[in-house]
Amino acid sequence: EIEPHQAGAIATWSVEQGVSVVLDLFEYDDEEIEEVTQTYVSALWEACKRKKRPYHLVVEEADVFIPQPLPQKSIWKYVAKRGRKYGLGMILASQRSQVVDKNILTQCQLAFLHYVSHPRDMGIYKDLIPLKTREVESLVGSLKVGDAIFVNDGQIDQVRVRLRETHHPGSTPLLEDDGSAAAGPNLKAVDGAALATLKRLIDAAGPPKPDPAIVALKKEIKALREDKEMSDGLIADLQSQVEAYKTHKDLLQKRLE
């Protein structure tokens, strides 16, 4: 487990030692995911600039990490446009291509496009497949499970992706499963020396340095919340007084009648 600010140390270690890393962000909230990915990918970028060795970044659920539109100076845009100069490439996987940043998608030289039905997804496919609109719609509509349109630098072909032969821990559970499919293979033990090195790197990263602007904003937010609580209390008191006045008015009206 790492804090967001510690991700850069692991990215640098991964490039320098030539070790693959799987960064699992499932337990992080949206703000932490943003901080982790920015820190991690920025460190990858700097490390690859120094080492200039082949390194590939695989981004699953790319629509979460590279949404449309990205800020102009996003680190993802640097990687997509200039990463190959330093040996840094990317593979993006997403079920929602319409919300992945368009500038990043246009940098992809190879594309495997599976069946989609949503008009916006189809619109992206029409930009990526060099055919007429009706031909694209017909071709995509004919795809079965496992079929894909393979686009390679303007050339297209229809391919079929075979079922995977290795254990798939992320597969969808089926009603007829007896539980054996989910058990999985016997995995190798973690490299103790590598784990110890990672632990030292994480510890050395230390606590995050507080950003003065963020500290000031948090203080302002706290003060505003306190003011709001006071205002809410005052409003409640005034509403009680109004109700009391209404009751007194009704009583006086009855006595007058």
Image (cartoon, rainbow, N blue to C red):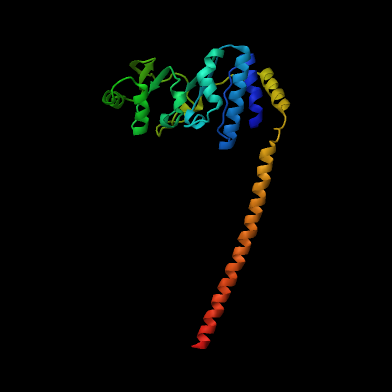
Comparing 254 with 147, the one in front is 254
Residue 244 picture quarter: bottom right
Residue 208 picture quarter: top right
Up the image or down, 73 lies above or below 254; here it is above
Q: Residue at 67% across / 38% down in the picture?
A: 213
Q: Is residue 239 left or right of residue 172?
A: right
Up the image or down, 70 lies above or below 147; here it is below
* Residue 69, x across and y down, in percent: 48, 32
Q: Is residue 22 left or right of residue 227?
A: left
* Residue 253, x across and y down, in percent: 51, 84
Comparing 148 with 8, the one in front is 8
Count the numbered circles shown: 0
Quadrant where the N terminus sits is top right
Comparing 138 with 46, the one in front is 46
Q: Is residue 34 left or right of residue 199?
A: left
* Residue 183, x across and y down, in percent: 51, 27
Q: Residue at 57% across / 71% down in the picture?
A: 242
Q: Residue at 66% across / 47% down in the picture?
A: 220
